[in-house]
Image (cartoon, rainbow, N blue to C red):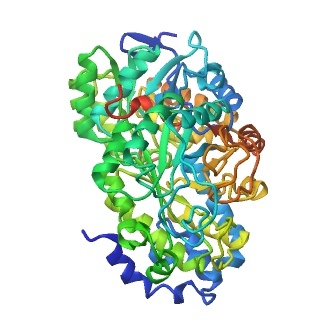
Amino acid sequence: MGDKLTIGGREFTSRFMIGTGKFPSDEIMTQCLFESGAEIITVAIRRVDLKNPDSDILRVLDPKKIFILPNTSGAQNAEEAVRFAMFAEQMGFSNWIKLEVTPDPRYLLPDPEETIKAARILVKNGFTVLPYMNADPVLAKKLEDEGCAVVMPLGAPIGSNKGLTTIDQIKIIIAQSNVPVVIDAGIGRPSDACLAMELGADACMINTAISAAPMPPLTARAFKLAIEAGRQAYLGGHAAKRDTARPSSPVDGISK
Amino acid sequence: MKNFYDEMLKISGMIGEKLSANIGGDMVLRTLEKDKVEFNDMLCLLSEGALPYMEVLASRAKEITDRHFGKNINLYIPLYLSNECTNSCSYCGFNINTITPRSTLTIAEAEREMKKIAATGMKNILLLTGEAPARAGVGYMENIIKIASLYFTQISLEVYPMDIPDYERLVKAGATGLVIYQETYDEILYAKLHETGPKKNFLYRLDAPERAAQAGFRFIGIGALLGLRGWRKEAALMFSHAKYLSKKYWRSDIALSFPRITPARGCNTEITPVSEAELRQMIFAARICFEHAVINLSTRESAAFRDSMTGFGVTRLSAGSKTNPGGYETHQEASGEQFMVNDTRTVEEVASAIRKKGYYPVFKDWDVSLNRGII
């Protein structure tokens, strides 16, 4: 299949990014990872414990099989986000960073000004930047202009599982973007992910909807299938909606 | 904007009736269906009328906890550095009038304790002192925090209230969290319980969380000592305090604790008991009112109770705690503890109990290297 997701010059077959937070155990997380077929997994730098590799989440992640994308979760401003990213690089991660700047610890909504500021510094320092952002089309273009590798608008507030409540803005972001658009937060059900992909999103990033599900591995598989279905629907295109009936076996030629 | 005291005075007089048994079941159930919990809803959840609906409250609290925190339970451990104190809090084992062995750990002793604690795998430490600035003051704490940074990835403090510049020094040294309990929001009772010593200044303590937020602490813990008077009013004021803080200091993470008084040597304060059922109600109500707040439950509570509350509102547990200075290594046999620990399990035993319940014990959730100015 030639349908690859290309980010920062790197190709991925899967369009499903998965998070590592909130799972009940490493075992269930790795099962979900397997079922999801995801090739990118995000890890919060603040959670990584390199001094105790045996007790750390990285113990169960094989970097040969999955691309580990560190995130700046917990950073409240640009300065902190840049520091987190540089710390991640020092830890031995690549220079890819999922940029999260969330000054409000309750709703974890991204700060647009500080995200732009941090993105500018990180791009200048050679990082491949994947910014989490509000679904603001102007902001998306500004982050693209700063040299971000993707834009990652939220579908709904993070952890809310409410789906694509920002759908109108997401449609504009997709229409205007020159970089891949990854729907990052709020996706609650596989049907939400499928819709996002049908609309033309390039990928979906999902965590809570899987980790908080009663049977996380099964849900991870459902998301995989939904994302694939949505992508194929987007590629295949869909017939127009209309108010009148149209027979599926046309009769136009009969009178000739 | 005014400080919390003005708001406290305004609401103190009007909450009593709304916390009574007169609240009907239909009102409790309606409250649970709401997306947004308002002030009166909070009172409804804390009322006597809500007691018969504990199972519904529990299930709502669990649902919210799962949504926001997933299946993770964070762990921390306290290190008591000093039990020297100039205050006379009549309920506290560190009270200046009690006859108890007094000590303040030297830097070397504190480091020995830290090494012992670090060997348990704990990464999040809470450093505690009494109020004796001459023995365990800001300079002492700065040095202790710097040593703690070598062994732990997250450092919080439970120390006497300070001015903003002193708090700033502690943040700069590497502390990210500050815990300060008001003990009671009843100003008159507070005056009776704290007759002498700097702690008798009610307002200075009440405003301490605000000063901490202004000084740059990310994580701020508040609480009331349960058992000093009827808990419903105390909880309602504490919740109002939390709401006020989280709106005014929107960058700070406000955590809630529910310490029930446990017997301390040499103390004879009259206690208004709070039952486990009542504590459950308070915690469930807290989770429903504060979807995102960390809720702590310390080893003051029994192992069985803590296990039963894991994930039902509670998101952070202490484990393996000793409450006397040097209790882990230096003075293992000594007394001088602040209160008796109820859950005496080791760190691993607590972690294992968390796993058995289908939750993930999180040891590391921050990295001291990420603090301002350290890298």
Asked whether A24 or B3 is in front, the reply is B3
A53 above or below A133? above
Q: Residue B298 vs residue A90: left or right?
A: right
Residue closest to the eye, B299 or B46: B299
Q: Position of residue B172 (x, y in %)?
A: 33, 39
Residue at screen point 64% across, 68% down: B261
Left or right of B1 in this view: A154: right
Q: Residue at x 45, y 75 (%)?
A: B39
Residue B28 in the figure: left or right of residue B169: right
Residue A163 point in image, percent of width and height: 48, 46
**Total number of numbered discs in the rendering:** 0
Q: Is residue A97 above or below residue B21?
A: above
Residue B14 image point, x, y percent: 44, 87
Where B239 falls versus B171 (above or below)? below
Residue name at image x 34 percent, y 27 percent: A83
Q: Is residue A251 visible?
A: no
